Image: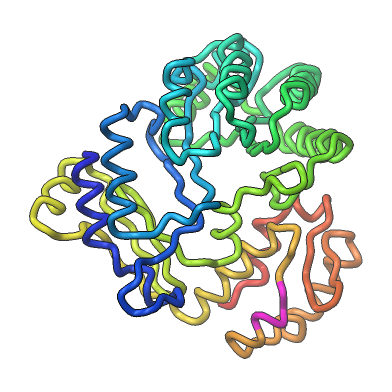
Amino acid sequence: MVEAMCQELNLQKEYLKSQLPVILGEKIPLQTVYFGGGTPSLLNECDLQLIFDTIQQFFTLLPDAEVTLEANPDDLTQEKLYLFRQFPINRLSIGIQSFHESHLQYINRAHTASQAENCVRLAQQAGFDNLSIDLIYAIPSIDHALWQADLERAVQLGVSHISSYCLTIEPKTAFGKWLARGKIKAADEEFAAQQFEILVDYLDRNGFEQYEISNFAKPGCYSHHNSSYWKQKPYLGIGPSAHSYNGSVRQYNVANNALYLKAIGEGQIPCTIEELTVKEQINEYVMTSIRTQWGCDTRELSRCYGVDILALHQSYLQNCQNKGLLLINDHTIQLTLKGKLLADQISSDLFMI
């Protein structure tokens, strides 16, 4: 699989050139690299060496590039962390989810509460000072005590970035089947909203900036990679299920490993290509930008697409302002805390149909 992904890097080396100012003959400079999806922390030294050698062969990894690797707490041994330090990996995103045993068991995680804490300390001891952790809220509970304790523990551990997501249960997943059989219960919307408000308030009081609805960082520690997604910058995804975007075209690779390996072995990229219409590009910009602290810049929409969204949705936007869901400052639409709870609904209401 690693060899196939390196071959895809070769096949895709021109993908970003149309969107980036590159002098003829020069390699495309990379500002971020993100090892995500699956469990990249299982990669061994040979795998990592091959991947980075291939990246350097076809691209230029900038000296200050942000290179993130996703990891599970139970994978982060001291030996593994020092291995990662031998490569340009300078940021870890750790899927902790909770520091409490009962919640980890509820969401069927393999690691323990003690591993959740210890892996952060081990990473810091290994020299990783740019750490992001994932936390899940709205796990059913009698009150908010465990959620408050999770946040307090995260702050005490000194991580610089926290991504926090509401637990959602999809019908066709194992969780969905358990829910249908009454094996588990889901938290109601009011409980989830209260936990979101606790999250925002507590992290704000402890020096974290909410720069996207689900992402909080100490000043200067925003994820450059994820920010690129929200700011509609082009990116290249490699491997099964990987998505790529160059500004007007989105493509996504086949999810099946065997089909992916077969196609790459034949020198083909097994992807579906989706040409975005102007309306779809506008909708994507609205959907991603309105979730961020920078908001939806209506002048950008006017400049790029000739759309005056303020005039188009004047009555709707005024109604949302009256309800305290959003603010319009200097031609920028920004959600309030109350509005962030309804972000998906508000953005879809602003879509070009």
Q: Is residue 28 above or below residue 48?
A: below
Indicate left or right for 257 with 74 as reference: left
Point 65% across, 17% down: residue: 99
Indicate left or right for 267 with 101 as reference: left
Point 67% across, 48% down: residue: 222
Q: Quadrant of the C terminus?
A: bottom right
Q: Quadrant of the N terminus?
A: top left
Point 52% across, 75% down: residue: 281
Q: Is residue 328 above or below residue 198?
A: below
The answer to whether residue 99 is visible is: yes
Dominant secondary structure (helix, strand or loop) of the stretch shown in magenta: helix
Q: Nearer the viewer, residue 140 or 300?
A: 300
Q: Nearer the viewer, residue 255 or 155?
A: 155
Q: Position of residue 7 (x, y in %)?
A: 20, 52
Q: Which residues are magenta?
A: 297-301
The answer to whether residue 110 is visible is: no
Q: Find the residue positioned furthest to the bottom.
A: 306
Asked if residue 300 is among those painted magenta in the image, a careful observer would answer yes
Q: Nearer the viewer, residue 124 or 198?
A: 124
Which quadrant of the figure has residue 270?
bottom left
